[in-house]
Image (cartoon, rainbow, N blue to C red):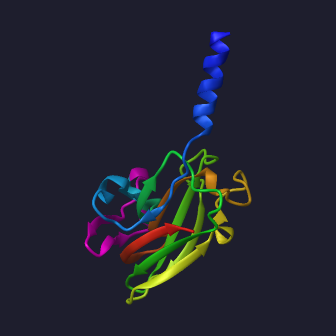
Amino acid sequence: MRILACIFALMATMSSAEPVQLNERFDAGAEARWRYIGDNVMGGVSAGQAQITAQGLNLTGQVSTDNNGGFIQVRREFEDGLSADVSALVLKVRGNGERYTVFLRTRQARLPWHNYKASFVAGQAWSEVRLELSTFERSTGLLPATISPEDVRSVGLAAYGADYEADLWVGAVRAE
């Protein structure tokens, strides 16, 4: 009986996880929440870096599709999903007029390239970009057709898929 009581207590603890309240303003401690990833992890030759300043996060570098590469990215991971009522991600961005991509990975992702993605263009002036979760495209039919916010485990901001110079500033990322 004690074993059953322990199992039920553990299950109750596991199901009471708090959803992530994503409202990133890149303040103190943001360096620990976001990490840079380049395509060199898979043999690509893109080169980049990410810095956090008083203005926000700055992702810069040269994206190259040589050697089957083609991305530089910053990613924030979290164990618990987003709140169930989240329907969109809102980003405050500026950049160099290039197209950038937001990648969402969910608990159903089994391989590194399993994700959902949506793109936006970052112009020279600060602007707010709203990306409805319903507009994100899945990378494979192995993922559910729609995103359940509770299943999201990471948000990635990337320069992706073409040869170009990246210069993306992100002042805020929030889930609504």
**Is residue 48 magenta-colored?**
yes
Of residues 10 and 173, the one drawn nearer to the viewer in this rendering: 10
Quadrant holding the N terminus: top right
Q: Give the residue at x 62% y 52%.
A: 150
What is the magenta range? 41-66
> Please, which residue is most extreme toward the left here?
53
Q: Quadrant of residue 132?
A: bottom right
Q: Relative to 16, is 149 above or below?
A: below
- Considering the image in quadrants, where does the C terminus appear? bottom right
Residue 92, horizontal then vertical, whole percent: 44, 78
Question: Is residue 43 in the magenta section?
Answer: yes
Q: Disc count in the image?
A: 0
In the rendering, at what x and y percent does residue 17 appear? Answer: 56, 42
Above/below status of 59 relative to 105: below
In this view of the protein, which residue sits in the foreground, 111 or 64? 111
Residue 151: percent from left, percent from top? 62, 51
What residue appears at the point 60 percent right and 46 percent down from the top-left corner?
107
Residue 139, by quadrant, is bottom right
Residue drawn 59% across the image and 34% down it: 14
Question: Horizontal and vertical percent for residue 118?
Answer: 58, 71
Q: Give above or below for 125 relative to 144.
A: below
- In the displayed image of the protein, which residue is found farthest to the bottom? 125
Residue at point 45% right, 65% down? 23
Quadrant in which residue 133 is drawn: bottom right
